[in-house]
Image: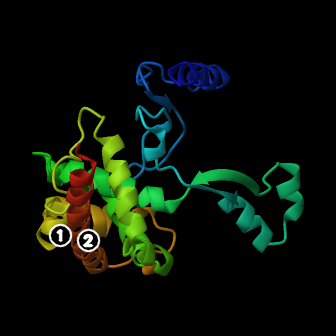
């Protein structure tokens, strides 16, 4: 797996050598993060300075514990949608802007990853600054929680099992906080107070809003707080589930 990681990283870097940022990239072990430069005209929360390509292999001895659900989805560029709306299909064909199908990680995995990351950030001494920097995770979790399909999933045992598997794999990382109570993480347990912190509130209500196409559809901060508080109740159930699973697995 690590050899495949190395070969894949090298191939991607060589293919894009003109924009590859070797000095920033992390290229050791089972986790690799490659950085690439790109032209941008906006600086703000939620917009990364570089393009990032992450390549990761699973270190779990028991691969059955892996949780990587994926679906094939059709990706339509925003430019393509605009050109279609004004009847300029010829330009789409001329410049190769057609929609394309690719394999994507299912949002069920995204939910678990974002919960895990917010737990890690909110247990940090510099939690306010880190949560402000990663405010997109709060927004995404809130949006997924308020989606009926994923709300049903969050209230099912499937989520508890998936979250359990994700915390086991995450626990292999040196900076992991997955061994701590997810339910007690301040971002969930004290959602109202944490989201009211000036740095965090500004990141959500002002900086994040700059990235939205239709600012009138930006959900109010209260909706995010509501989702985080409800997720806390789900994570309380998760902690009981985790304790039960750990007891069952003990010899």
Secondary-structure class at tag 2? helix
Res 238 → quadrant: bottom left
Residue sitting at x 46%, y 37%: 50
Q: How many other residues sit within 10 Å of disc 1, few (<14), some (14-19) or many (≥20)?
A: many
* Residue 199 against residue 5 in the figure, above or below: below
Decide if residue 45 is in sight here.
no
Q: Position of residue 246 (x, y in %)?
A: 23, 51
- Of 239 and 74, nearer the camera is 239
Secondary-structure class at tag 1? helix
Q: Earlier in the sequence, mark 1 or mark 2?
A: 1
Numbered label tally: 2
* Residue 185 against residue 189 in the figure, above or below: above
Q: Position of residue 132 (x, y in %)?
A: 25, 55
Residue sitting at x 26%, y 53%: 248
Q: Do the residues labelled 1 and 2 touch (CB within 8 Å)?
A: yes
* Quadrant, the C terminus: top left
Q: Where is residue 118 in the image (x, y as percent from the top left)?
A: 26, 55
Q: Mark 1 to mark 2: distance in Å?
A: 6 Å
Q: How many other residues sit within 10 Å of disc 2, few (<14), some (14-19) or many (≥20)?
A: many
Decide if residue 176 is in sight here.
yes
Res 217 → quadrant: bottom left
Residue 191 - label: 1
Res 8 → quadrant: top right
* Residue at the spot of label 2: 228
């Amino acid at each position: 797996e690590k050899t495949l990681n190395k070969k894949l990283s090298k191939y991607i870097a060589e293919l894009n050598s003109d924009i590859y940022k070797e000095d920033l990239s992390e290229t050791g072990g089972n986790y690799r993060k490659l950085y690439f430069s790109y032209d941008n005209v906006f600086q703000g929360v939620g917009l990364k300075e570089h393009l990032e390509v992450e390549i990761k292999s699973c270190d779990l001895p028991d691969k059955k514990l892996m949780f990587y659900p994926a679906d094939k989805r059709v990706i339509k560029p925003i430019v393509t949608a605009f050109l279609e709306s004004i009847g300029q299909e010829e330009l789409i064909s001329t410049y190769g802007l057609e929609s394309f199908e690719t394999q994507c990680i299912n949002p069920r995995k995204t939910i678990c990853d974002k919960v895990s990351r917010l737990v890690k950030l909110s247990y940090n001494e510099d939690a306010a600054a880190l949560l402000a920097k990663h405010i997109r995770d709060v927004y995404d979790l809130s949006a997924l929680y308020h989606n009926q399909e994923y709300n049903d999933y969050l209230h099912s045992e499937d989520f508890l099992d998936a979250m359990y598997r994700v915390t086991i794999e995450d626990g292999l990382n040196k900076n992991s906080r997955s061994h701590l109570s997810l339910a007690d993480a301040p971002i969930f347990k004290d959602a109202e107070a944490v989201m009211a912190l000036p740095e965090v509130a500004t990141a959500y209500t002002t900086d994040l809003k700059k990235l939205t196409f239709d600012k009138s559809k930006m959900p109010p901060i209260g909706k995010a707080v509501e989702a985080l508080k409800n997720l806390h109740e789900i994570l309380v159930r998760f902690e009981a589930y985790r304790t039960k699973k750990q007891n069952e697995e003990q010899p």
